[in-house]
Structure formats: structure tokens, C-alpha cells
Image: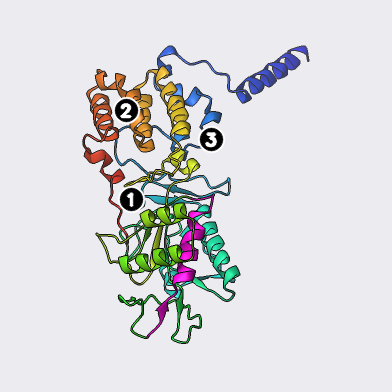
Amino acid sequence: MTVDRHILLFAVLILILGAQGCSVEPAGWAEGRALESFDSRSFSLLPAITVAPMPTMMGAGFDRPDQPSEDDGQSYSIGTASRGYLVGGAPLPNDHDALKVRPVSIERRAVHGTHAVIEALERAAAVVARKWPGSELFAGDISAKQGGDIRHHASHNSGRDADLTFYLRDQRGSMADGPDMNALGRDGQTKAGLIFDDARNWELVSAMLQNPNVQVQWFFVANHLRSRMLTFAKRVGADPRLIERASITMRQPGDSSPHADHFHVRFFCGLEERLRGCVDTGVRHGWVNSYAAEIEVEMSQIVALLRGGGDDEKRYVIKRIGQLALSSGARHLESLAQDPDNSIRVMAIDTIAFLRGERTPPAWAHLTDEDVGE
């Protein structure tokens, strides 16, 4: 009976040790295991690949995780607007008084965006409707639920692009909002005689630029409509700083349609998205928060993985710092540019060149797409 009790106690001890993660491994097994033993709590904002198998080659900069984590109820734009994807996409509302959904976009299944983008559209539409009751803003294509390429667009891949109808009036001055996107000529009118509503369209732009929860990169819109809104803003005495920001963010794209039939709004990545691998391309306006300080902290934590000394950790660090796309990250990779492993050395040299703007190696070409407006 005593022997059985000892055996039972020994079995319980083994179970307890096992539950606590205690194990004994031959010394040779330690290579490449530093990431697994690293305290990952400080990496709560990193993508799922942080705890997934380590990449064995450079490959694409944004390999979609097989099972992206959406348990936190949040959503993230990953990659660029033209070569990215969406995690935890939120749909446009179907019961909002001021924000409606274009039926054609529902058919295309292109009505998902990040929570921040959807909320920004709802908020701006509500601002206009409070001032002009009965106003209806129709949202068109944003992104597919999981992002990626969608028909008719070169961008709209990662949930932070949104097509919006213009506010219109008829010849009698009555509101004539609707889901159709018909081009407006130099006189600000459609072929059917509907008129671009300078006041409400300016209010929409103004509301988005003043929303503290998002940062607008572009309002793609035709030059003659941009001029109408800026002229109206000056006439009514809008804040000169707001007018300046609007004049910078409103632009007619040179690589797509002039956007005389709808707005195309593009938002910058939010902080958590930047830490997870969201990348802004093109111009960063002077007033925009680039989150450089927060990204520096993240990079220092990522670089700490190099203490393990494994090649897998080195490849992972190079890839993650490249994804964060901050020029100061190059200095963290300088030691790896001398690595004895040729593949690691080449990865580091290429990524340093990319971060410093010297050249764009093929492995990082997907992070340099232009400001396409479609």
C-alpha cells in the first residue's frame, strides 16, 4: 500500500511539473528555440505569426496567417492599401439613418472595413445629417471581408479605402442624394441636372479631417470639385488651418479616373495596425502622427530576439523590422549585414536598402505601391 502511495505521489508530481512546462532537453535542441521561450506578453500587438512557425525564407512580406486572431473583437488593416488584407473586417451598417450602402457594393461583397473606418464614415454622415436633416451618404466599395483584391479596383485591399457618393441637390434646391455615381461636369452638374452640394460635401470633408480617432491621407476627387469646396470654405470663414489640410488631402489622382463621380477616402494606419504590419505608402502629411516613438519601442523588443542567436530568429527580426517600414529600423540590422550565413546577409542588406530608400528589392516591392485612387 505504501509503495502504491509513493507511485501515486510521483505520478502527481510528474503531472504538476508537466503542467508548469518543465522539461529537460539535450543541449543541441536549444538552437532555434529562443522565440518559443521568450515572454510573448509584450508582443500582444504583433500578428499571429509571432507564435506561428518561423519563416524559413523571405517570401512575401505579408504571408496571411492560416488562423488570424479575431478573438479580441478588433479589426486590423495589414499591408498596404493595394497589396494588403483585412483581419476582423466590420460590415457597413444596414440600419443607419444617415449612412446607406450602395446595392452594387453589397452584390460585390465589398462592404467591410476596419472598425475605425466604419465608425468614421458613420460619424461624418451623422454630422452632415444633424446640420441638414434628411441627408443620406451612400457608401460604396470598401474591401472584402478578409481584404485582398476585388473587382474594379487596384486598391481597396485592406479595409481603409472607402468610396462615397457626393451630396447632390436638384434644380429647385432640394436634396437629391442617391446611390448612383454619375460624373459631374465643370459646372458641377450631372447630365440629369443634379448639382454638387458645396456646403454638405465640404462638411463631410471637414468632419473627417477633425475626427480625432482617424487620420485621413487622401480624398481623391476631381480638381474642379475640390476647387468648389475650398472656395465655399473660404467664403463661409472656415478655419484656415482646416482649409489648408483639406487643400492638401484633396487631390485628383493621376493614375486612375479623375473621380468626378465620387469621393475615394483613404485613411492612414492606426497605431495598433502599424505594430501588426499595416504600412502607409506615399506622402505623410506634416500634421499626421507617424507613431515613430511607439514603433521604436516595438523594434527594440523585436531585436531582443537576436539574443537567441538562431538563424530563424534572425530571419524573423529582419522580416518584422522591414514590415514596420520605419527608416530608423535599418540600424538594427547592420550587424546582420555581416552575418556568415549568405541568405541572412542578403536579406539584411536588401532590407536596409529598402528602409533607407536606396532601392526596392523584389522581396519588398509590395510595400511601395503608389497612391492609386481606384
Q: Which residues are magenta?
A: 193-214
Q: What percent of the width, then of the height, locates residue 34?
A: 45, 21
Q: Residues within 10 Å of mark 2 (few under 14, many from 20)?
A: many
Q: Which residue occupies the foreground of this view, 47 or 310?
A: 47
**Residue beneath label 3, please?**
44
Q: Which residue occupies the foreground of this view, 316 or 233?
A: 233
Looking at the rendered image, the disc whose residue lies closer to the viewer, 3 or 2, is 2
Looking at the rendered image, the disc whose residue lies closer to the viewer, 2 or 1, is 2
Query: In this rendering, is residue 209 above or below 327?
Result: below
Asked if disc 1 and disc 3 are in contact, CB closer than 8 Å, the reply is no
Q: Residue furthest right?
A: 1
Alpha carbon distance from label 3 to label 2: 23 Å
Residue depicted at x 30% and y 59% = 154
Q: For numbered disc 2, what is the local secondary structure? A: helix
Alpha carbon distance from label 2 to label 1: 23 Å
**Residue beneath label 1, please?**
83
Q: What percent of the width, then of the height, locates residue 347?
A: 26, 30
Query: In this rendering, is residue 141 above or below 341?
Result: below
Residue 330, label in figure: 2
**Amino acid type indicated by mark 2:** Ala
Q: What percent of the width, then of the height, locates residue 38?
A: 50, 23
Residue 181, label in figure: none
Is residue 96 in view from this perspective?
no
- Image quarter where the N terminus lies is top right
Question: Which quadrant of the figure has residue 276?
Answer: top left
Q: Which residue occupies the foreground of this view, 144 or 326?
A: 326
Q: Which residue occupies the foreground of this view, 201 or 141?
A: 201
Q: For numbered disc 1, what is the local secondary structure? A: loop
Comes first in the chain, label 1 or label 3: 3
Residue depicted at x 35% and y 37% = 325
